[in-house]
Image (spheres, grey):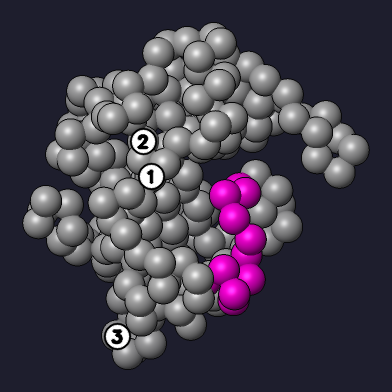
């Protein structure tokens, strides 16, 4: 468990180091800044919760890594203030909607050993490899925690080609489709699942 809690260092393509660690109760300010700074486009593809300061305060006050692990990527630019540039959720609390869809189209979810995954990267740091490397790290830790399945929280929008390609590189496979309505617009979504025995060292 200690290894799953330890901070790890990733390197951006421009050479700057980034620390990946669990969200802390002291992260309210940088976490609120990260959430508020996500563009409308990014928010439109990512919706596990609201993006305001109240949400940052609540999540930082309710940390429970036995149920939900919230990983953040913190830019190490030599300044004392933390700048969060990535955020990924790994939670054992599978929503009723996700459970129902998998029950309908399979494969069966092993709820005691399954987690939902939701990644996001600050707009200015997208397309720099951070999302891929951070996700690989988080998913390796999922396997170390004894999780055998990881699903996408709420699926992925079919129109989000960038995310779909990322998930495929990470070893997720498509298992079903479903539709949601948002602001009167019908949106096609895909359910994708990962077997955590996937060999990340080869990807």
Query: Which residue occupies 73% across, 57% down?
Result: 40
Image coords of residue 134 (percent x, y): 33, 50
Which of the image's four quarters has the C terminus? top left
User: Which residue, given by chain and number where applicable, does mark 1 sit on?
Assistant: 91
User: Which residue, given by chain and number where applicable, does mark 2 sit on?
Assistant: 115
The residue stretch that appears in magenta: 46-56
CB contact under 8 Å: marks 1 and 2: yes
Q: In this view, does 30 lie above or below 2?
A: below
Q: Which of marks 2 and 3 is nearer the N terminus?
A: 3
Mark 2 to mark 3: distance in Å?
Answer: 35 Å
User: Which residue, given by chain and number where applicable, does mark 3 sit on?
Assistant: 78
Query: Which residue occupies 37% across, 45% down?
Result: 90
Mark 1 to mark 2: distance in Å?
Answer: 5 Å
Query: Main SS type for the magenta part?
Result: loop
Image coords of residue 94 (percent x, y): 45, 36
Most extreme residue toward the bottom is: 80
Q: Please indicate whether residue 184 sits to the left or right of residue 159 in the image.
A: right
Q: Quick check: is 52 in the magenta stretch?
A: yes
Q: Is mark 3 on a helix, strand or loop?
A: loop
Residue 72 visible in this rendered orientation of the protein = yes
Residue depth check, mark 2 versus mark 3: number of the one nearer the observer? 2
For label 1, the crowd category at 10 Å Cα-Cα, with few meaning under 14, some 14 to 19 and many 20 or more, is: many
């Amino acid at each position: 468990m200690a290894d799953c809690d330890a901070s790890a260092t990733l390197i951006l393509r421009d050479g700057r180091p980034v620390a990946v660690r669990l969200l802390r109760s002291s992260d309210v300010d940088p976490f609120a800044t990260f959430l508020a700074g996500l563009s409308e486009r990014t928010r439109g593809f990512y919706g596990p919760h609201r993006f305001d300061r109240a949400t940052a305060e609540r999540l930082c006050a309710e940390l429970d890594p036995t149920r939900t692990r919230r990983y953040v990527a913190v830019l190490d630019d030599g300044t004392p203030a933390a700048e969060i540039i990535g955020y990924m959720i790994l939670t054992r609390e599978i929503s009723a909607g996700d459970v129902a869809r998998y029950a309908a189209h399979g494969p069966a979810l092993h709820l005691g050993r399954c987690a939902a995954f939701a990644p996001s990267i600050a707009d200015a740091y997208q397309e720099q490899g951070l999302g891929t490397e951070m996700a690989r790290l988080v998913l390796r830790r999922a396997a170390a925690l004894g999780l055998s399945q990881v699903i996408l929280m709420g699926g992925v929008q079919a129109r989000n080609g960038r995310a779909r390609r990322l998930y495929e590189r990470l070893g997720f496979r498509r298992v079903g489709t479903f539709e949601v309505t948002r602001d009167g617009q019908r949106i096609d979504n895909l359910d994708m699942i990962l077997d955590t025995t996937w060999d990340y060292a080869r990807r």
